[in-house]
Image (cartoon, helix red, strand yellow):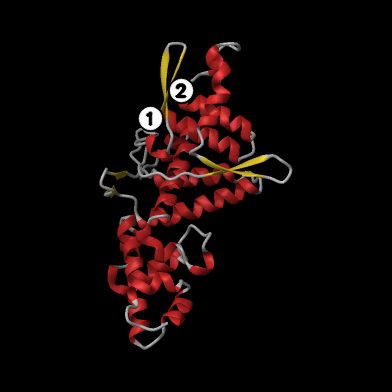
Amino acid sequence: MTKITLNGHTYTIPARWSEVTDRSQFIAICQALYDYETGVTSFAELRVALAVAALGLNLRRVQEGDHLYENIFRIGELITFPYTVEELPDGSSVATINIRLQNNLLGPVCGIKGYSYRTDSAGIVDTDLTAGQYIEGLSLLNHFAACVRAHSEAAPEVLYSLVNTLYPLPSPHYQKLLTSFTREEKVAILYNFRGITEAIAQDPDYDLIFHQAARRSDPSPVGLQGSLFSLSKAGLGDIEAVRALDIHTYLSALVQQTIDSIHTLAGSGMKPGKIAQKLNLTVEQIAPYTDNIDA
């Protein structure tokens, strides 16, 4: 945390995502990121918006010439954790949004509980986010990003579907209730889920399924829908039972399935280099499971 004092008031500025714990602050930061990624604001405007969000300001109440107003740009330069900057050949800068979250920071929205996701100080996760929600949500995240890139008018409908997936309510009045969600809340739901999926994808425990050799930049497991059938066939229950697994039980099962495949191929006499090639992994990834086998 960074503390600054302006006009006799001390403000606490988050320096990393783990320090963003205030719900209203999180929603405002997400809106700033959304406006930038959808082309509404420039990089310079993003910095200002992040400062305003972090300080919890209402710019309409801040007078031009006020000491706080004059320092907003400087404060914005301090808030760098949500993005990385790349300098372009023409001298301009472009920011790539980075968001990794360990918790659902929103909690219930409009009385709808939604999924829970909490990580304690020891790194233990307590969640009811299911494999089915994860798979559908990840697909919708990718679809939404494609809509934004194409400036498609379908983007709001995709966002609606994502909210519906993560905050389900079996009620004939659900659609009416969902429309009471503010635009800012829907955007925050999107970024919260995106941050959680990004954190999961970087978890070393899941390296075998997220960081395949030929798809290093792909944050998603290969063949998510197919994995439901694969795990069902392996004895984890029917498709609906697999879909109902919590996300970490599901991903751990996929990792174990990959490890079993490595052991089976190694037991057949296949060399590590061939095993890595067959499973689309690197030799370094499979090395812990192929001890005493020459490459």
Residue at image point 39% right, 42% down: 172
User: Callout 2: few (<14), some (14-19), or many (20+) C-alpha neighbours within 10 Å?
Assistant: some
Which quarter of the figure is the N terminus placed in?
Answer: top left
Q: Which mark is residue 265?
A: none
Q: Residues within 10 Å of mark 1 (few under 14, many from 20)?
A: few
Q: Which residue is mark 2?
A: 56
Q: Quadrant of residue 43?
A: top right
The residue at which mark 1 appears reads as 22
Q: Quadrant of the C terminus?
A: bottom left
Q: Amino acid at mark 2?
A: Gly
Q: Give the quadrant of residue 261.
A: bottom left
Q: Secondary structure at mark 2?
A: loop
- Look at 40% across and 66% down and name the residue there: 208
From the viewer's perspective, is residue 266 above or below residue 168?
below
Location of residue 51 in the rendering, given as x and y in whole percent from the top left corner: 52, 27
**Residue sitting at 42 percent across and 70 percent down?**
284
Vertical comparison of 23 with 151: above or below: above
Assess whether mark 2 and mark 1 are in contact (beta carbons under 8 angstroms): yes
In space, the residues marked 1 and 2 are separated at their CA atoms by 10 Å
User: Can you see residue 182?
Assistant: no
- Looking at numbered disc 1 in the image, what kind of residue is underneath it? Asp
